[in-house]
Amino acid sequence: MLEIKNLHVEVEGQPILNGIDLVIPDGEVHAIMGPNGSGKSTLSYVIAGKDEYDITDGDILYNGESILEMDPAERVAAGLFLAFQYPIEIPGVATMTFLRTAINAVRKEREQDELSIPDMMKLIQAKAKDLGVKPDMLKRGLNVGFSGGEKKRMEILQMALLDPGMCILDETDSGLDIDALRIVSEGVNALRSETRSMLVITHYQRLLNYIVPDKVHVMSDGKIARTGGKELALELEDAGYAEYDEELA
Amino acid sequence: MAAVKETIDHVKELDLDKYKYGFTTDIETVKAPKGLNEDIVKFISAKKDEPEWMLEWRLDAYERWLTMKEPEWAKVEYEKPDFQDLYYYAAPKSTEGPKSLDEVDPELLATYEKLGIPLKEQAVLAGVEGAKVAMDVVFDSVSVVTTFKEELAKAGVIFCSISEAIKEHPELVKKYLGTVVPKSDNFYATLNSAVFSDGSFVYIPPGVRCPMELSTYFRINEENTGQFERTLIIADKGSYVSYLEGCTAPMRDENQLHAAVVELIALDDAEIKYSTVQNWYPGDKDGKGGVYNFVTKRGDCRGDNSKISWTQVETGSAITWKYPSCILRGDNSQGEFYSIAISNGMQQVDSGTKMIHLGKNTSSRIISKGISAGKSSNTYRGLVSAHKKASGARNFTQCDSLLIGDQCSAHTVPYIEAKNSSATFEHEATTSKISDDQMFYAQARGLNEEEAVALIVNGFAREVIQKLPMEFMAETQRLIGISLEGSVG
């Protein structure tokens, strides 16, 4: 269970998040929607532990423990996973090498035995196949020269491999055509379970046709402005964010 | 690659042993008196029981050295060594010349065991099973042992210390010594010519493909002692050899001097592949101590269709001044230089290569990857030149610099001279920083900071790492992690 309590965050003295309260119980999928600049991506980075943010008040608890003092790698080991809106390229590091390094780093931190190379290859190849990640992609530099769709599939592959309890998907639908959106969504849905929760951040309702949330939150000006069921997304699709966005109002 | 994992494991152990080769060996030594004069040169020559011609060669070099000045053009700053305050010869008392393995002082064997280099003929290096590597082991001023000599002799390969070669194969030494790096070449090379202590000698006969990797491991142990390595490798017509060189030194507060000369000669259709992993003690974080690595390495592609390839991984030393070069004399000859130079802390590196195109249709390729961290300075300095008669000369140069943090610097100083209008020279250079985004991305996948840096840098240097013999690949990936310890956060 992820609990965010009265979270206030600043970047270089500028307040970005102004008191977020949010609880995501095990097994639930929540969506956060909102206009650009409302603080959605900041929230995802703060949960993952990017260090350019000052947390001025509040707390984030995962399974009852504050994660604020944990470094990003410790948070991954604890079970948090962030799928990036813009996955980063690391030239020269073969994707397969990266995946293997990440899996064993996390397993070690979780005090699990490291996987042998053959077991590792089997695991990665099987999951890659499910997501339509071609063997050729695993040999290339991480994210180097990948299309938008390939990058997002790689994010979901990493998510599947690192076995998180709480997945945060930051605008996973951006830059995807309808086919890629379907493949990625199927990959995400396959990971839904009673013990795994998800926080899906998106600007558009269309992703939520594929990944159907239990709850939808609207974020505006660094706060949760409204919370509802999945029908709230449809309402936003019709009315837009004008109500929540000072510039558009 | 499993090696990445090894890098990572190794980085994790680092709190305990930052420079794990920094111990000293307590062993009785024979030293020359401190300082340098004609008598010292005679002392060294006599200790090695050298023939008269060798002594004369040394004395001539010494005379020339007295008239020379230390070069100052490199982008490095240091207190000049006091050449009268150094020992020019130090040898373990028990080892007055190389012996067979079972005669070697157990204290020395233990030293190399600790360095991760078990001196056994069935030994494997860097965990690569079944790979045989013949070793020449130089401790301070003398070669202590050379392994697999008999097996190599069956193939006609001569692999021994240079001291031994001077006595046993004078005709070869006389014919080739100083023909690539003349004894008056430069200040340090000339000093080396006068007082060189030990190093390896390799001769591969015509048409022979050397049956195993050859390797020399250099260790400076004694305080205030200069190591003047001299290595000479000759690949006769149509032969092939791959040679590896590794180096370490104890942690000492004083600077130690390593002034080596390496000469390679490839005759018609011959190929020499020379790889170095240099990990001399770099000094502490404030720049105290460390090895001055002032080295002249040059290869002569003397024959047609010959090839010389330098691969270097430079992670150690307080100051590195080193330009492994190729003289492309034979028609269709090829020169290659693949380099990874890592500087951290207060280290200064000024390194690169020279590709001198003299023959027709010669080609050269330079891939240099410089990685600077801490407060270090890392300079690539290279010359590519084509002589008037070098029609059809081709060069491709790529110099990439990677910066970690904002207190280090990287410089690229390429010199290009084409005196033949048909020469084609290409030069590409990039400078980049490890971005915070890359770091965060790797960390958000469960890697800690050190693991993330090691992974990203290994990716950056991959093209060069792949050129190393397999035995050195894993070691290098580990070293990259170790060398960059403490470079972030």
Image (tube, grey):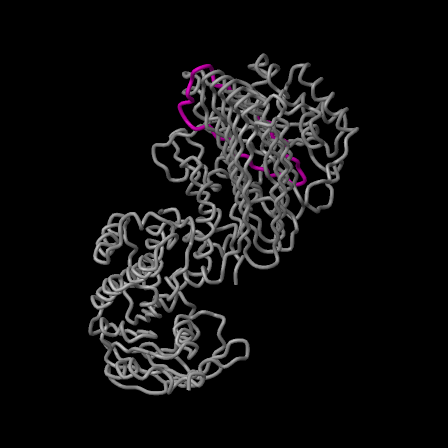
Query: As rendered, which of B100 and A14 lies closer to the eye?
Result: A14
Is residue B143 shown in magenta?
Answer: no
Is B462 left or right of B329, judged from the image as shown? Answer: left
Is B89 left or right of A93, judged from the image as shown? Answer: right
Residue A183 figure quarter: bottom left
**Helix, strand or loop: magenta stretch:** loop
Query: As rendered, which of B30 and A177 lies closer to the eye?
Result: A177
Which residue of the protein is positioned furthest toward the top in this rendering?
Answer: B171
Residue A211 figure quarter: bottom left
Task: Please determine whether, in this image, residue A111 is positioned above or below residue A57.
Answer: above
Is residue B215 shown in magenta?
Answer: yes
Q: Which residue is drawn at 51% across and 26% down?
A: B334
Which residue of the protein is positioned furthest toward the right in this rendering?
Answer: B67
Q: Is residue A166 visible?
A: yes
For the record, the magenta segment spans: B203-232
* Residue B280: % across, % down: 57, 42
Task: Please determine whether, in this image, residue B461 is positioned above or below residue B234.
Answer: below
* Residue B378: % across, % down: 61, 47
| Tally of numbered tags | 0
Query: As rendered, which of A39 and A60 lies closer to the eye?
Result: A39
Query: As rendered, which of B477 and B444 lies closer to the eye?
Result: B444
* Residue A200: % across, % down: 30, 73
* Residue B409: % across, % down: 62, 52
Q: Residue at x 55, y 51 (%)?
A: B431
Residue B465 figure quarter: top left
Q: Residue at x 60, y 18 (%)?
A: B176
Q: Can residue B232 be seen in this view?
A: no
